[in-house]
Amino acid sequence: LLAGRVDAAVHSLKDLPTENPPGLTVGAIPVRADPRDVWICPRGHTLETLPEGAVVGTSSPRRRAQLLTRRPDLDVQPIRGNVNTRLRKVQEGQYAAIILAAAGVTRLGLEKHITTFLPFEVMLPAAGQGALAVQCRAGDEATLRLLRLLDHLPTRLAVTAERAFLAGLGGGCSLPVGAYATVAGEQIILRGVVASLEGGKIISVQGIGVDPEGVGASLARRALSEGAAEFFSGAV
């Protein structure tokens, strides 16, 4: 971008650092896709019916922590590769089930593999999950004017609150943190969770306000005051 070879780049927002590199900004955040995670099990088991000790694949500390809070008897193992590679591995029986982001699966037209969508009460998504971010040069007014046509204000407000919560905790996608916000009128309703990597301990917080940065930062302080920082030592 800064070298001038392209005007803008599209990212999955949940993978974008909470701070923009110098000279870059997020010029547009379009309407968000489904932010939930999905459960994929070729044999049709749900999270509740999966046999004890079954192997579940995920490389996300957030998913691992929330999964083991619900089912501490499961064997959660890392899984690598793109969506198609992970689907192949679970179909071959290397894993009994895997967890993926709904948006990534549906954007590839692979909905037929989804066993169930995990509700927020079970698996709170990563900050910004389901949203795209169009990044461009901060001073490029011509590009910024065009990108404003793509920007969806409710989505931007929601994900800004989620990312402020994550930033307030001092980390990124390597932390066992979930966040999801909705917008109702002028109110932003933000839910956040921080969980221990091995399950069993979870801090759930919720806040409401009109300033997305303020709501996220305030909720992060509350989570830290309740001991959230102790869950981060084992995250990588």
Image: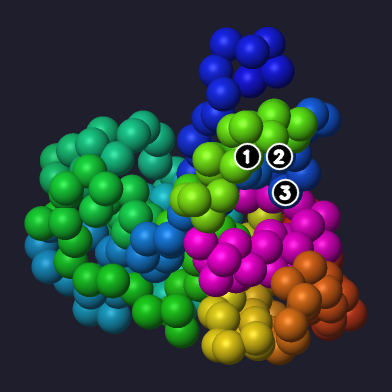
Kindly check if marks 1 and 3 are in contact, taking CB atoms under 8 A apart as contact.
Answer: no
Count residues near mark 2 (Cα–Cα under 10 Å), then give few for <14, some for 14-19, many for 20+.
Answer: some
2 and 1 marks in contact (CB < 8 Å): yes
Rendered image: mark on residue 144: 1
Disc 2 secondary structure class = strand
Which one is earlier in the sequence, the residue at label 2 or at label 1?
2
Marks 2/3: CA distance?
A: 11 Å
Give the residues drawn in magenta, as a range: 152-174
Q: Nearer the viewer, mark 1 or mark 3?
A: 1
Instruction: Tell me which residue sits at (17%, 48%) in the image.
Output: 109
Q: Quadrant of the C terminus?
A: top right
Q: Reading the chain from its start, which is encountered first: label 1 or label 3?
A: 3
The residue closer to the viewer here, 105 or 202, is: 105
Considering the numbered disc 3 on the image, is that residue within a helix, a strand or a loop? loop
Asked if 106 appears above or below 85 in the picture, the reply is below
Q: Which mark is residue 18?
A: 3
Residue identified by numbered label 2: 25
Crowd around label 3: few <14 · some 14–19 · many ≥20 (10 Å): many
Q: Say what secondary structure mark 1 lies in.
A: helix
- The three-letter amino acid code for the residue at tag 1 is Leu
